[in-house]
Amino acid sequence: WLPAPGPGSPGPGPRLGCAALRNVSGAQYLGSGYTKAVYRVRLPGGAAVALKAVDFSGHDLGSCVREFGARRGCYRLAAHKLLKEMVLLERLRHPNVLQLYGYCYQDSEDIPDTLTTITELGAPVEMIQLLQTSWEDRFRICLSLGRLLHHLAHSPLGSVTLLDFRPRQFVLVDGELKVTDLDDARVEETPCTSSTDCVLEFPARNFTLPCSAQGWCESMNEKRNLYNAYRFFFTYLLPHSAPPSLRPLLDSIVNATGELTWGVDETLAQLEKVLHLYRSGQYLQNSTTAGSRAEYQRIPDSTIPQENYRCWPSYHHGSCLLSVFSLAEAIDVCESHAQCQAFVVTNQTTWTGRQLVFFKTGWSQVVPDPSKTTYVRASD
């Protein structure tokens, strides 16, 4: 075997080993690819984690055994991918790389020293569902991806490219996007003698990159990652239902990554700029002037339990629950909805610190609630 990752863990506490797997409960099969199968289990302490192991009924192991008949040797060949991924998870530690909690070598069936890795548990990236979520949550995924690609371009190992770059290679952990499949990652840049050796090929179009004096295709790894981020994530998630004042900047990010006119550094800088404008409320500077707003009466420690209406995109399917930067923005939103006559400010905030607000069609029943404040439209 190659040396296993050294001591030290991205999370607090000692690295998990075989002892942690002896009394797991609630094992659940999550899915598999050509080589690996993934399971969800609960550790004795109650924490849920993901286990990855070579899939004994998988494509890679099965085709190798059919061709060579050497089950142990074929296992070692397939396990090399899992081992490579484990080492990369350890070396590329970052908030947007899935955390490796530990690993275990144990005998299984007729094969000694089979490898199981223990990692953070994430939810699969379902693109259809993401398109139905708020722009704020979709922007968070794009920002996560921008930060990840910046880290991969400047990693301790050099510039890392993901040869298999699809939504299924990522998971969501508490709203943050994290890469989980690294067995098809490559560190080496492509050697070249001229720019004709430096063609990035995609289904819709190709790009020719310069060949450096040192004989490497310039920035090929990061540009491959960036265009894949554009075609799988940015083009769908970034501009869709964004605040109107942010659209020009978001369109420029989508266009520049789609044309590869920016590298990852400039792309991340622009994504961070969008975050700053949104989080600080600066994107609201040209909103409705205070003088033209209707008057709203404040009723502290209260809520309106019913009188909901649906809006899109809402944080709650049965009602209109949106995030706002300020009371002024909440009033603007209510004024822009024909059916809105009142709103309830909660004490819950989103990942950017914005408050969640329920918008209502009326206020016929106002009830006490110490965690909320109700605002009703004053009679003309």
Image (cartoon, rainbow, N blue to C red):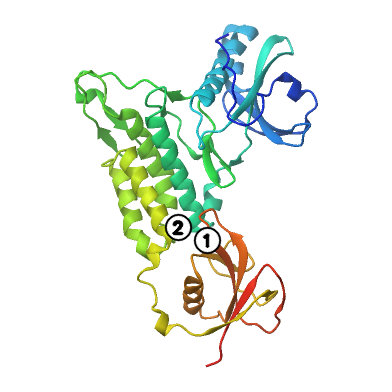
Report helix, strand or loop for mark 2: helix
The amino acid type found where label 2 is placed reads: Arg
- Would you say the residues marked 1 and 2 are in contact, meaning their CB atoms lie under 8 Å apart? yes
User: Spatial distance from mark 1 to mark 2, Cα to Cα?
Assistant: 8 Å
Residue at horizontal 75 percent and vertical 24 percent from the top: 21
Q: Is residue 117 visible?
A: no
Q: Is residue 124 left or right of residue 157?
A: right
Q: Quadrant of the N terminus?
A: top right
Nearer the observer, 187 or 28? 187
* Residue in the image at 51% along x and 80% along y: 338
- The answer to whether 224 appears left or right of 128 in the picture is left
Q: Label 2: how many residues lie within 10 Å, few (<14), some (14-19) or many (20+)?
A: some
- Report which quarter residue 210 is drawn in: top left
Residue 100 location, quadrant: top right
Numbered badge on residue 354: 1
Provide the residue designation for mark 2. 279
**Which mark is first along the chain, 2 or 1?**
2
